[in-house]
Amino acid sequence: MRRLIWLLGLLAAAGWQHALAADWRMDPSGSRIEFVATFEKSAAPGVFKEFDTRLQFDPDRPAQSRLDVAIKVTSADMGSAQVNEAIRGAEWFDFARYPQAEFHATDIRRIDSNRYLARGILSLKGARQPLEVPFAWSESAQSATIEGELTVQRGPFGIGTGEWKATNVIGGEVKVKFKVRLRRAG
Amino acid sequence: MFRNTRDAWGAPAKLFHWLMAALVFAQIPLGWTAATWPLSPLKLNLFVWHKSVGMLILALALLRLAWRLGNPAPALPADTLAWERLAARASHALLYLLMVALPVTGWVINSAANIPFRIFWLVPLPAIVEPSKHAAELAAAVHFGLFVFLATLLLVHIGAALRHHYIKRNDVLTRMLPGGGART
């Protein structure tokens, strides 16, 4: 019995701790995920038009946080009908089999005053790889913005198979930039 | 001999002619192979070569045209008939036009298709039209049509040069050769 009370107490404490971390939902109109690939030594920019972000986050207690991002890979737009047609194929994103990518992180730590690092797992084209996502946090009365930039290697996710594995024509590194506006939920 | 004279081409005019000939004869198979090759890194590289050579041809064509306008061509042999003079003038004018129009329509295709491109992987080429699938397809059809026209004109041009040399036995062909002057 004494044990049970202890356990309940711990659970309550944990729940209370969790309750401190505010729930944030994405405002799509103020949010953007861009990426820049390399095509024959030229920058080839694109965007994911559809994605969603949820965040449980208290800037002063980042340890209690959780970041969940779902990206509709099929909403990728690289500004060229020909390129958009090519990237949907099995050698690239394989829209038919892997329409969605996800990033989940429960390990978020502060780097300095308003900058944080979310360490999680990116699931993309059926591959799961650890990924570190740095972001800057800014907060006003009812909204907040997270903003950051990172580099993702396409190889480990099998983006570009066969002849496309070589990185001299289409570069191996893809720069990703994001700005997500969040509103306090509830 | 630098400038053209009444009877002979100057060295710059000959250099322009043969450099352009070499580039055009490289460019045609490059473009054909690039367009028909299955999508692969090689195809993308062939296109970078084709587009880069095209921009080189455009620059060279404009310089050549400027040189030609400031340097009248040597006279045709005295016995050249009126229709031959007209045919020569028209075909040369059209060749100059195509040396500019083919690269420009290629540039339009690349701009409309919105494909990132650096000339010889170095110099970024700005877009001259807005991205548009329809415009890209239209420009590609025009580019191909102009290519067919150019191929036909080149056959006429080469055929006429050989006719001058072997049938009319004048110096029109030899005077364009490096070191070649009037026929002796």
Image (spheres, coloured by chain):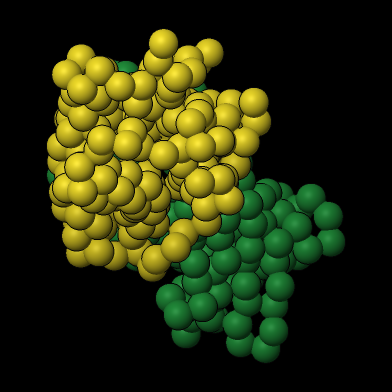
Chain colours: A green, B yellow
Vertical placement of residue A139 versus B170, above or below: below
What is the number of callouts on the image? Answer: 0
x then y, percent, for residue B126: 52, 56
Would residue B121 be visible to someone looking at this image?
A: no
Question: For the point 54% across and 81% down, which residue is it?
Answer: A184
Which residue is nearer to you in this view: A145 or B98?
A: B98
Question: For the point 60% across and 82% down, which residue is it?
Answer: A143
Which residue is nearer to you in this view: B91 or A15?
A: B91
Would residue B85 be visible to someone looking at this image?
A: yes
Which residue is nearer to you in this view: A6 or B181?
A: B181
x then y, percent, for residue B8: 50, 29
Which residue is nearer to you in this view: A119 or A173?
A: A173
Question: For the point 17% across and 19% down, which residue is it?
Answer: B167
x then y, percent, for residue B5: 56, 35
Vertical placement of residue A80 versus B42, above or below: below
x then y, percent, for residue A60: 75, 65
Q: Is residue A126 left or right of residue B53?
A: left
